[in-house]
Image (tube, helix red, strand yellow):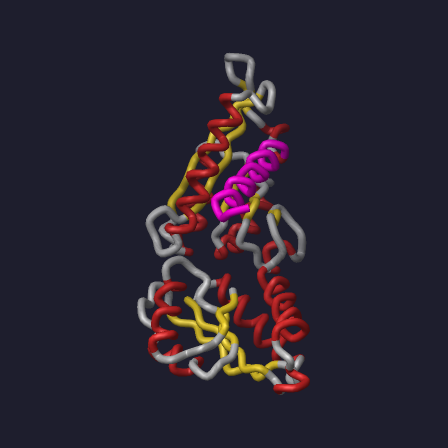
Amino acid sequence: MNHKGKIAMACFMVVALLATLCFGCAEKEEEGKVTITIGHITDMTGPASPAYRAVTFALEDLVRYFNEEDLIPGVKIDIVTYDTGYNPARDIPGYDWCRDRGAKVIYGALPSAVVLKPFAARDEIPIVTLAVSKDMIDPPGWMFAMNAPVSYQVKAFLKWISEEHWDWQTKGPTKIGSAGWEEPYHGEITKAIREYAEAHQEQFDYVGGYLVPMGTPTWAGEVEKLRGCDYVWIPSTGVDTVGFAREFRAKGGRATFIG
């Protein structure tokens, strides 16, 4: 399945799940149907928008398809979208904005959304998220994950590298590091790599994890520190991935990119 197909399939699952979660709190309409309003908190104009716009368009298309084909008899789905510009300070205003417009469930993929956990519990509004950190779901509450926390994924990936991709028993420990913007998602990635490498020092030589302020466009210092690595967990947010890769290769870095 190609990338667009995966986005569409994920959004299909989201629409079906969200409709199920909030069916009991839907609002009645004159035409005999009930309306379920989904709040969508995303980035349409900020640094992560190239990825999140595709998710938004797929979600909107599927909501339209569900309504036109009457896939949930007696139910009309509505969606209200709030653009944070990938600014964590706008997550709570975005939540309030969606709630005030009748959202009975909220969907989003922003890694900073963990700040909404106490508000979701207070208002008993389920929040379904794609970018999952451990704090969102442990202890459990009103946040629901579409995948495993990123720290679990990181450690599983490093385990695979040590077992299948790097012969540390012959070559010795492999050098690994990471770089990214200073935001919750990549912060958890950095922590997971450090923890796993320090717990398996015979397999990994941890060079470092470097976080820079959000929006930083260049990576000269981080590239220089990581240039000798065998593996680099590349920046994971928005448009910074390509910029880092370009600078890294231009400086002679030969590491395998992971992420």
Can residue 93 be seen in the rendering of this structure? no
Give the answer, above or below, for where 229 lies relative to 81. Answer: below
Work out which residue is located at the far left of the displayed protein and give it.
217
Depth check: 246 or 155 in front? 246
Image coordinates for residue 146, horizontal then vertical, percent: 60, 48
Relative to residue 250, is residue 2 drawn left or right?
right
Depth check: 68 or 1 in front? 1
Give the answer, above or below, for where 143 lies relative to 194. Answer: above
State the image quarter where residue 162 is shown: bottom right
Q: Residue at x 54, y 82 (%)?
A: 175
Image coordinates for residue 155, horizontal then vertical, percent: 63, 68
> What span is in magenta?
1-20
Give the answer, above or below, for where 7 lies relative to 47. Answer: above
Q: Residue at x 45, y 34 (%)?
A: 60
Instruction: Report the magenta stretch's main SS.
Output: helix
State the image quarter where residue 124 is shown: top right
Q: Is residue 8 magenta?
A: yes
Image coordinates for residue 245, horizontal then vertical, percent: 39, 69
